[in-house]
Amino acid sequence: MRSPDSHKGENGKVAVIGGSLHQHGAPLFSALAAEASGADLIFVCIPACHTEVTKAQSLNFQVHPFAGDELTKKEVPMILELLATMDCAVLGPGLARTQSTLDAIEAIIVSATCPLVLDASALQPKTPELAMNKGCVLTPHAGELERMKIDPKHIGQVARDRHITILAKGIIDRIADDEGVITEVQGGNAGLSVGGTGDALAGLTAGLIAQHLAPADACRIASNVIKNAGDALMETYGYAYGTRRVIEKIPVMLKKIRA
């Protein structure tokens, strides 16, 4: 519950770092979901070519363009300075996987001073080690678990040993907290296979962490919200409801959970 006399920024500041020349939607889904979580302020770091489309998605977004169309180490000092003022950040949606971008991702994970939700391109073989003891959440699907060389049966052990939280996405989401305890979240339907729902999940998780939820609790609530939204939307749209409608359902589903 937020304090009734709180002021702007006291209920969560979230940054999203993502996007590349050919991918603008992924970081925007994360940012819109963070906004829908109720977080006060949203900052979006994206390629320069996507500046205007990002501004058009929300009047509340504060947009910080990269110098060019990909994240490189030149952007790292600016991003780290921004993250020093954040309550949580999403890193990875839509980012390229060139070596220069992967080097920048690694530098951000190592030096960030706020909790990170690491998704998509930020999930690399070295990520669990880089994220150790930093309050990070990793949000892999099965392919990203394989890329990180994590056996799905051992996510609890990895989370405990690295002191991280892992939200392993699937038909049943499995959340391993930093003590290795696993919680399962069921529900949802095949309409959630559409592109962008994982980005929305990452943004919602970050928004909830920014509002002072523990990482595992934020993962559990975010997973339930996305799955419940998909179930509610299927009644009207079948499987063709899309990620934007899922995000629009977030405030309603959060209100039901908090009631």
Image: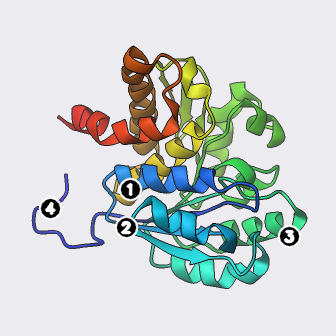
- Is residue 211 left or right of 46 when viewed as pictured? left
* Circles 2, 1 touching at the beta carbon (< 8 Å): yes
Q: Amino acid at mark 1?
A: Glu
Q: Counting other residues with Cα less than 10 Å from the Cα at mark 1, is it few (<14), some (14-19), or many (20 or more)?
A: many
The image quadrant that residue 131 belongs to is: bottom right
x, y percentage for residue 41? 37, 68
Find numbered disc 1 in the image and state the secondary structure of the residue it sits on. Answer: helix
Find numbered disc 3 in the image and state the secondary structure of the residue it sits on. Answer: helix
User: Gap in Å between the C-alphas at discs 1 and 3?
Assistant: 30 Å
Q: What residue sits right under mark 1 in the picture? A: 35
User: Gap in Å between the C-alphas at discs 3 and 2?
Assistant: 30 Å
Q: Amino acid at mark 2?
A: Asn
Q: Nearer the viewer, residue 180 or 117?
A: 117
The image quadrant that residue 49 belongs to is: bottom right
Against 52, residue 188 (above or below) is above
Q: What residue sits right under mark 4 in the picture? A: 3
Find numbered disc 4 in the image and state the secondary structure of the residue it sits on. Answer: loop
Q: Looking at the image, is mark 1 or mark 3 earlier in the sequence?
A: 1
Q: What residue sits right under mark 2 in the picture? A: 60
Q: Nearer the viewer, mark 3 or mark 4?
A: 3
Q: Looking at the image, is mark 3 or mark 4 earlier in the sequence?
A: 4
